[in-house]
């Protein structure tokens, strides 16, 4: 005759290790379902709390571009380098000039001639007011023509010096600079600078519908630098996506060299909201659920409505749980 084994129902043992938090209580629950089987739960006691949710936008520079600057030719003698890495520049600023001493000397000579002619012109003009004569009139006319011609020469030479310089194409920042020494010579294959150009306009796309305040300066940190932005506009696409535009505002930093930067914007504060850490929420088939720990130690699946997930890790619930419920981390 086959002997039947004796079965003894397992005794459930609960050990509660209590802790406390700002909004609720987390517990580690351990119990025995049978003499040979052990399970453990980490729970959170649902509570109401005041939160200030944030939305993170990834700002993208609209006109960001990098430009590598090369010399116009070989064996051009560098006279001076006007910028260093990290310097911010405006459109038209001189980055580097090639040797132009001869032209500068010529400009000085022409300017001296202009000054002398101007003195004579003023002198003979006063004499002409006293004694009008053809000879004085001819002298004044020649001096006037000489001033005009020499002034034209000065303008042409200055333009040639400008053409003999490397200029910033737009507002930007010097990202890299070759090891240039004054009085060195260029090679057409070796870059002079790497520039980052941008106009300071940034855009971001999000499914979140927010209303940034155009009067507020929003701050975004990147490394040790804080950048400031002002909200410009909001548009909604046919697929429901919102497109936000921001303008960089110079402050401690006069230029924003980033192509992408994260910007967090606070939404309207929520008072006494029912919250649980978002890792306690399970999503399946477009629905949200939590596991509630019953008094007998068993878990119960409960559908909930999540209205918000904050950047600092909270899920705001509109329905499905009550204050004091203990939810279980799956």
Image: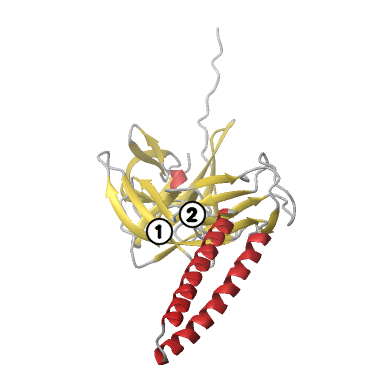
Which disc number belongs to residue 327? none
> Which type of secondary structure does the marked residue at label 1 adopt?
strand
**Can the viewer see residue 248?**
yes
Q: Where the N terminus falls, by quadrant?
A: top right
Q: Nearer the viewer, mark 1 or mark 2?
A: 2
Count how many numbered circles sit on residues in the image.
Answer: 2
Residue drawn 58% across the image and 69% down it: 110
Q: CA distance from mark 1 to mark 2?
A: 17 Å
Q: Please, which residue is most extreme toward the left here?
A: 238
Residue with the mark numbered 1: 247
Residue with the mark numbered 2: 170
Give the camera-side residue of 304 and 149.
149
Residue drawn 42% across the image and 39% down it: 299
Q: Please, which residue is most extreme toward the bottom here?
A: 130
- Residue 51: horizontal and vertical position, in percent? 40, 60
Q: Circle 1: is it few (<14), some (14-19), or many (20+) Cα within 10 Å?
A: some
- Residue 329: horizontal and vertical position, in percent? 48, 42
- Contact between marks 1 and 2 (CB within 8 A): the answer is no
Q: Quadrant of residue 85?
A: bottom right
- Residue 66: horizontal and vertical position, in percent? 54, 46
């Amino acid at each position: 005759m086959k002997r039947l084994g004796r079965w003894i129902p397992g005794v459930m043992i609960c050990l509660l290790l209590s802790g406390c938090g700002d909004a609720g209580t987390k517990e580690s629950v351990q119990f025995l379902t049978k003499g040979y089987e052990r399970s453990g739960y980490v729970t959170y006691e649902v509570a109401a709390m005041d939160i200030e949710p944030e939305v993170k936008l990834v700002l993208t520079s609209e006109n960001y571009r990098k430009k590598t600057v090369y010399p116009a030719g070989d064996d051009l003698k560098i006279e001076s380098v006007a910028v260093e890495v990290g310097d911010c520049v405006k459109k038209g600023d001189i980055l580097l000039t090639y040797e132009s001493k001869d032209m500068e000397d010529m400009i000085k000579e022409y300017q001296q001639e202009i000054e002398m002619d101007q003195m004579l012109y003023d002198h003979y003009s006063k004499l002409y007011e006293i004694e009008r004569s053809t000879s004085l009139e001819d002298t004044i006319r020649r001096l006037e023509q000489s001033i005009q011609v020499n002034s034209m020469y000065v303008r042409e030479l200055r333009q040639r010096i400008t053409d003999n310089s490397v200029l910033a194409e737009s507002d930007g920042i010097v990202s890299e600079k070759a090891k240039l020494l004054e009085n060195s010579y260029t090679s057409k294959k070796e870059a002079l600078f790497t520039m980052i150009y941008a106009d300071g306009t940034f855009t971001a796309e999000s499914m979140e519908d927010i209303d940034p305040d155009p009067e507020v300066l929003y701050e975004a940190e990147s490394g040790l630098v804080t950048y400031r932005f002002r909200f410009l506009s909001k548009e909604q696409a046919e697929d429901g996506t919102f497109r936000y535009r921001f303008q960089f505002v110079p402050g401690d930093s006069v230029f924003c060299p980033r192509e992408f930067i994260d910007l967090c914007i606070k939404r309207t504060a929520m008072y006494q909201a029912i919250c649980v850490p978002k890792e306690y929420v399970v999503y399946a088939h477009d629905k949200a659920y939590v596991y509630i720990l019953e008094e007998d130690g068993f878990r119960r699946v409960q559908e909930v409505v999540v209205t918000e997930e904050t950047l600092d890790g909270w899920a705001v619930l509109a329905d499905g749980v009550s204050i004091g419920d203990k939810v279980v981390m799956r």
